[in-house]
Image (tube, rainbow, N blue to C red):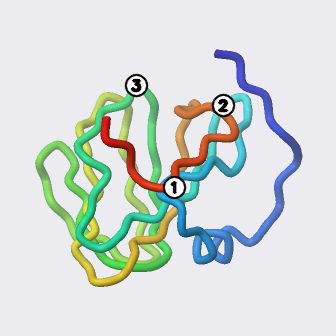
Amino acid sequence: MKIEAKHFFNENIIELVKQNSLYRKELITGSHSQVVLMCIPAGQDIGEEIHTVDQTFFFVEGRGQAVINGVVTDIFPNHLVFVPAKTHHNIKNNGQDNLALFTIYAPAQHKPGTIEKVKSEE
């Protein structure tokens, strides 16, 4: 899949994350990476995943846990979690509020324009 940058991007990422209520919203996709906003409701998680791309999570609001290859660590605002390609991972919201974050995939994982209102039942 050939992916090209939509346009130059320079915006306040923290405010965009705080305003987002969608489970997943592709924000910008370039030739080598992609930024996606995410909002995980209280008591939910992304489900265990493994990608062929690197993934970086940056948490803006809420509390939860990162489970990386079975190792559980706490996450909260201003924390960054890096997940190398081919690593089992899950992000869990065990707080009472939404877990608001952005994630960077390198290279891109989702089609440009991807919007998911809620987590898919895949």
Judge from the rendering whether residue 98 lies leftward or rightward of residue 44; answer left or right.
Answer: right
Disc 1, SS: loop
Q: Residue furthest right?
A: 8
Separation (CA) of disc 3 from disc 2: 13 Å
Residue 72 found in image quarter: bottom left
Judge from the rendering whether residue 83 lies leftward or rightward of residue 53; answer left or right.
Answer: left
Q: Which residue is mark 3?
A: 52
Please state the horizontal and vertical placement of residue 83, each as a whole percent of the image.
36, 44
How many numbered circles are shown? 3
Taking 115 as reference, is 58 above or below it? below
Please state the horizontal and vertical placement of residue 24, each as a whole percent of the image.
52, 52
Q: Amino acid at mark 1?
A: Lys
**Crowd class of label 3 (few under 14; some 14 to 19; many from 20; radius 10 Å):** few
Please state the horizontal and vertical placement of residue 18, each as a whole percent of the image.
58, 77
Residue in view at x 26 percent, y 63 percent? 44
Which mark sits nearer the N-terminus, 1 or 2?
2
Residue in view at x 63 percent, y 37 percent? 33
Residue 32 badge: 2
Q: Which residue is mark 1?
A: 117
Q: Residue furthest left?
A: 70
Separation (CA) of disc 1 from disc 2: 25 Å
Q: Amino acid at mark 2?
A: His
Q: Nearer the viewer, residue 61 or 120?
A: 120
Residue 57 badge: none
**Crowd class of label 2 (few under 14; some 14 to 19; many from 20; radius 10 Å):** few
Which mark sits nearer the N-terminus, 1 or 3?
3
Q: Nearer the viewer, residue 73 or 21?
A: 21
Residue 12 found in image quarter: bottom right
Taking 58 as reference, is 122 above or below it? above
Taking 122 as reference, is 24 above or below it? below
Separation (CA) of disc 1 from disc 3: 24 Å
